[in-house]
Image (cartoon, helix red, strand yellow):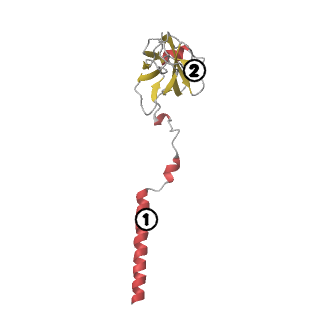
């Protein structure tokens, strides 16, 4: 493959899920799949394979997809059965945390970027969580992030009425005092 000297380093743009301002959250449960889709830009020498990984905040790296993260270089998407992955990899289970999707071509994750070739990608963040079973209040559910401190807070309407009363009282007192000096 002849690559012109003016070529730029190839890249990946995520098309699925749609880019959002907030993190995408995925449930680790039976029947839950994550589909990552992308397009390659400025790639003149297509890789023969792509490696797709999810790098977790806990330091672990997880292979994405049905083939331990290695897919054909012409692929434009990968579907990850996260429940199946969880069941098959009990030694390093998926964590309830944030992840960064990372992809690179057959030149490797640490390959020096070259014009016309795919550069490494690591710009999409998402999170995964494990749903909890429903527990009613009657069965002892308690809010783990709630605080009883709000019970002692005075309602703003009461504070407004109290301030209004003092203003009226002291204004009237001042008027009576001023008028008694004039007479």
Sequence-wise, the earlier of marks 2 and 1 is: 2
Which percent across, then down, holds residue 126? 48, 27
Identify which residue, 150 or 125, lies in the foreground.
125
For numbered disc 1, what is the local secondary structure? helix
Residue 25 location (% of width, % of height): 46, 28
Viewer-side residue, 142 vs 122: 122
The picture places residue 168, in percent across and down from the top left corner, at: 39, 72
Regarding residue 56, the answer to whether it shows in the image is yes
Residue at position x 42%, y 15% in the image: 76
Residue denoted by label 1: 162
67 lies above or below 119: above
Residue 6 position (above or below residue 134): above
* Apparent side of residue 82 relative to residue 172 in the rendered image (left or right): right
> What x and y, as percent, mark residue 130?
50, 26
Residue that appears at 46% across and 25% down: 26
Which residue is under mark 2? 61
Residue drawn at point x = 52 percent, y = 25 percent: 100
For the C terminus, the image quarter is bottom left
Q: Quadrant of residue 75?
A: top left
The 10 Å Cα crowd at callout 1, few under 14, some 14 to 19, many 20 or more, is few
Can residue 129 be seen here? The reply is no
How far apart in space, not on screen, are marks 2 and 1 (Cα)?
59 Å
For mark 2, does the 10 Å Cα neighbourhood hold few (<14), some (14 to 19), or many (20 or more) residues? Answer: some
Q: Is residue 180 above or below residue 7?
A: below
Measuring 40% from the left and 88% from the top, which residue is drawn there?
182
């Amino acid at each position: 493959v002849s690559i012109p000297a003016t070529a730029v380093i190839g890249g990946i743009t995520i098309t699925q899920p749609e880019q959002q301002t907030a993190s995408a959250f995925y449930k680790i449960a039976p029947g839950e799949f994550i589909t990552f889709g992308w397009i390659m830009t400025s790639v003149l020498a297509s890789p023969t394979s792509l490696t797709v990984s999810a790098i977790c905040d806990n330091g672990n790296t997880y292979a994405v997809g049905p083939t331990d993260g290695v897919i054909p270089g012409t692929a434009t998407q990968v579907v990850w059965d996260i429940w199946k992955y969880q069941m098959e990899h009990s030694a390093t289970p998926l964590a309830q945390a944030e992840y960064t999707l990372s992809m690179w071509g057959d030149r490797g994750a640490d390959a020096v970027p070259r014009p016309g070739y795919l550069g490494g990608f690591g710009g999409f963040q998402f999170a995964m969580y494990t749903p909890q079973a429903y527990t009613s209040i009657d069965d002892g559910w308690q809010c783990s992030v709630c605080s009883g401190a709000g019970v002692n807070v005075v309602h703003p309407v009461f504070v407004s009425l109290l301030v209004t009363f003092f203003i009226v009282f002291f204004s009237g007192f001042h008027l009576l005092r001023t008028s008694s000096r004039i007479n």
